Structures are given as structure tokens and as C-alpha cells.
Image (tube, rainbow, N blue to C red):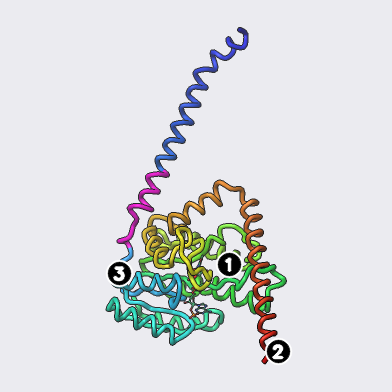
């Protein structure tokens, strides 16, 4: 009786606190659903057109995700500047774009692992009206490994920093856009530390931070800078041969990603990857994500080293029998 008489005055404020909480959650959910619909169903596919500037520049353009960006941008009518390591492979891709999409192409053959290539890139880009730059080139580990066990660690570090980080800063600088779009291909591995891929993960976190900071600096000038963080895509880098819903082909990934440009400054680029990104950053504590990443990579490392040993034994045996 006494407790009841105490509760009666609290009833009205509690009702309003509850009503306010339910209303706020409903509005938040509605907002999330509508913005999800805008990004993943309606998309912004028409934004990227040569009206931004005649040329699209793609680094790492001869394979995987970079090649798919080059094809998709050529299909939209951009002239293409392709930058990769091997002149032969650049010539093949350039020729196929010219034949299939009737667009102009140019190429620059450089090794992004080297630091002295930027005067050559600057000279190649000088005078081009650049509408889109895709900073795509990147290298990863050949297999997950503990930091101090990485073969030729010294060169490995220099190469990965030059290819994954320096290239993004330097090519953005050399491209000098007045308006237009820069897409910086980071990775979901840059969203949290990934043990046994530690250097890769850290370089990709750099790309994400660099992009997001730069976007704020140049937003008022109308330049769009997007940080793209894919999970697995079936390319030479991942050695995934059979694409699945969560490990799409690069063509499928790029088509989805381009619909998010102008709508998200940081994106996983593809709806199933966005769900994975949400679960791993918002739902699961980061300590668990890091722990599970380490476990997955330790298993992969063991499998890889076993297969390598078997291969070496087999080669040794066949060498002896010759
Ligand atoms: N695939 C994935 O699951 C995934 C996931 C997240 C993020 N990413 C990121 O997406 C980007 C593309 O990955 P991908 O899977 O498409 O890679 P990929 O299939 O291995 O293709 C890499 C491209 O970069 C070029 N390249 C590599 N090293 C180079 C160097 N030192 N100098 C110049 N060009 C070089 C390669 O051409 P040449 O060998 O002929 O030079 C090739 O055109 C990377 O930044 C990667 O980190 C990929």
C-alpha cells in the first residue's frame, strides 16, 4: 500500500520517458531504413559520368578490382589512364577497352614499390582533365604470418608502405582535381587490427583515415573523396576462384560500389559487406573480432605451411628419382 502510494507520482514521468525512448528508437530505425533504401536500392549510379572531367585514372588497373573499375568507367564513356607495373598487361587492357567501349586510353608503367616514380606519373597526368581517380593499387601478404617471421621483412615493409600508402598520397597530389571524385580502396582489414596481417591492416587503416580527413578538407570545393573498405572479393590477391554472395566477383563488387559514391564517404561498397561491417563494428566487441581474426589467420597459416612442406617434399622426391 505504502509502495503503491510512492509509485503513483512517478507514473507520469516514467510514461513520458518510455514514450520518448520508443519514439526516438522508431525514428532512428526509420531513418536507417530510408537511408539504407536510398544507398542500396536507389543508389547514385548516374553521378559518375564524363561531365566530371574527361579522364578516369586507375592505379593497379590490369587485374581484379582495378580492372573492373577501368571497365565500368570506360562503359560510362570516360577516357582511361591505366597505371600498373607491366607494360604488356597494360597494353592488353587498354586495347580491349578501346575495342569494346570505343574510348581513348593512355598507360603509365611503374612499380609502386619504388619511391622515385612520381615525376613520371606527374608528367603522364599533366594537362589531363581528370574527373575520377581510383587509388586501387595494393598488395597483401602471400599468407598470414607473425610479424617477425615474415620473409625478407625489411623489403616487405618498404614495399607494402610504398604500394599501399605512399601511392594514395602521391597520386592524389599529382592528379589535382578541380571537381570530381577520388575513390581510395582501403579494406575491411583497415576497420580493426588484423593479427598475422598486421602491416596490411595498418596500411589500410591509414588509407581510410587519409581519405576521411581529406574529404572534410575539400568537401566545400565539391570534390568527393570516398574510403572504400571491401571484405573478400574473388581476385588474384585472395585466390578465391568460386565467387559467392559474400565473396563477389570484382565486376559485381564495383557495380555495387559505384552506386554509393556521393552517398557515403566511408563505405563497404556492397550490401552483404555492409552487413558484415555493421556486425563486426557495432554488434561484436572489437576484442572478440580481433581474437577471431587471429584464430582464422593462425589456421590459414598452418594450412599454408603444411601444403608448402608437402610440395617441397614431393619436389625433393621427384628430384632424387630423376
Ligand atoms: N580482393 C579483395 O578481397 C580485397 C579486399 C579488400 C581490399 N582490397 C584492395 O583492393 C585493391 C585491389 O585488390 P585486388 O584483389 O584487385 O588485387 P589484384 O587482383 O592482386 O590486382 C592488383 C593490381 O595491382 C597491380 N600491382 C600490384 N603490385 C603493383 C606494383 N608494385 N606496382 C604497380 N602495380 C601493381 C597489379 O598489376 P601488375 O601485377 O601487372 O603490376 C594488378 O593490376 C587493393 O588495394 C587491395 O588491398 C582487395
Which numbered disc, 2 or 1, marks the residue that appears first in the sequence?
Answer: 1
Given contact means CB atoms under 8 Å apart, are the residues at marks 2 and 3 in contact? no
Q: Secondary structure at mark 2?
A: helix
- For label 3, the crowd category at 10 Å Cα-Cα, with few meaning under 14, some 14 to 19 and many 20 or more, is some
Where residue 4 sits, quadrant-wise, is top right
Residue on which the image places disc 3: 76
Residue on which the image places disc 1: 203
Please name the residue shown 46% across and 29% down the image. 20
Q: Comparing marks 3 and 1, which lies closer to the viewer?
A: 3
What numbered label is drawn on residue 320?
A: 2
Which of 254/18 is in front?
254
Residue 283 coordinates in the image, percent (x, y): 56, 46
Residue 131 coordinates in the image, percent (x, y): 35, 70
Q: Comparing marks 2 and 1, which lies closer to the viewer?
A: 2
Q: CA distance from mark 2 to mark 1?
A: 44 Å
- For label 1, the crowd category at 10 Å Cα-Cα, with few meaning under 14, some 14 to 19 and many 20 or more, is many
Residue 125 coordinates in the image, percent (x, y): 40, 80
Query: Is residue 40 depicted above or below 123 in this figure?
Result: above
Which numbered disc, 3 or 1, marks the residue that appears first in the sequence?
Answer: 3
Q: Which residues are magenta?
A: 32-47
Q: Comparing marks 2 and 3, which lies closer to the viewer?
A: 2
Amino acid at each position: 500500500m505504502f509502495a503503491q502510494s510512492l509509485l503513483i507520482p512517478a507514473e507520469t514521468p516514467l510514461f513520458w520517458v518510455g514514450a520518448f525512448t520508443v519514439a526516438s528508437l522508431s525514428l532512428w530505425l526509420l531513418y536507417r531504413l530510408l537511408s539504407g533504401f536510398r544507398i542500396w536500392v536507389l543508389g547514385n549510379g548516374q553521378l559518375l559520368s564524363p561531365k566530371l572531367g574527361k579522364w578516369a585514372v586507375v592505379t593497379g588497373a590490369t587485374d581484379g578490382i582495378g580492372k573492373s573499375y577501368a571497365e565500368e568507367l570506360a562503359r560510362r564513356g570516360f577516357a582511361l589512364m591505366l597505371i600498373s607495373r607491366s607494360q604488356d598487361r597494360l597494353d592488353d587492357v587498354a586495347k580491349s577497352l578501346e575495342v569494346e567501349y570505343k574510348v581513348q586510353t593512355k598507360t603509365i608503367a611503374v612499380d609502386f614499390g619504388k619511391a622515385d616514380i612520381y615525376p613520371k606519373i606527374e608528367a603522364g597526368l599533366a594537362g589531363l582533365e581528370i574527373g575520377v581517380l581510383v587509388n586501387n593499387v595494393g598488395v597483401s601478404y602471400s599468407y598470414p604470418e607473425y610479424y617477425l617471421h615474415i620473409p625478407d621483412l625489411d623489403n616487405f615493409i618498404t614495399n607494402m608502405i610504398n604500394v599501399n600508402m605512399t601511392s594514395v598520397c602521391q597520386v592524389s597530389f599529382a592528379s589535382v582535381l578541380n571537381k570530381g571524385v577520388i575513390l581510395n580502396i582501403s579494406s575491411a582489414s583497415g576497420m580493426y587490427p588484423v593479427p598475422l596481417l598486421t602491416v596490411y591492416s595498418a596500411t589500410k587503416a591509414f588509407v581510410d583515415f587519409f581519405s576521411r580527413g581529406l574529404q572534410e578538407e575539400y568537401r566545400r570545393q565539391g570534390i568527393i573523396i570516398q574510403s572504400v573498405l571491401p571484405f573478400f572479393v574473388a581476385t588474384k590477391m585472395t585466390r578465391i576462384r568460386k565467387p559467392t554472395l559474400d565473396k563477389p566477383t570484382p565486376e559485381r563488387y564495383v557495380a555495387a560500389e559505384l552506386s554509393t559514391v556521393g552517398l557515403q564517404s566511408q563505405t563497404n561498397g556492397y550490401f552483404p559487406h555492409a552487413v558484415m561491417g555493421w556486425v563486426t563494428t557495432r554488434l561484436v566487441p572489437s576484442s572478440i573480432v580481433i581474437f577471431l581474426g587471429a584464430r582464422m589467420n593462425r589456421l590459414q597459416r598452418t594450412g599454408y605451411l603444411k601444403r608448402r612442406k608437402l610440395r617441397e617434399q614431393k619436389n625433393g622426391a621427384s628430384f632424387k628419382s630423376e
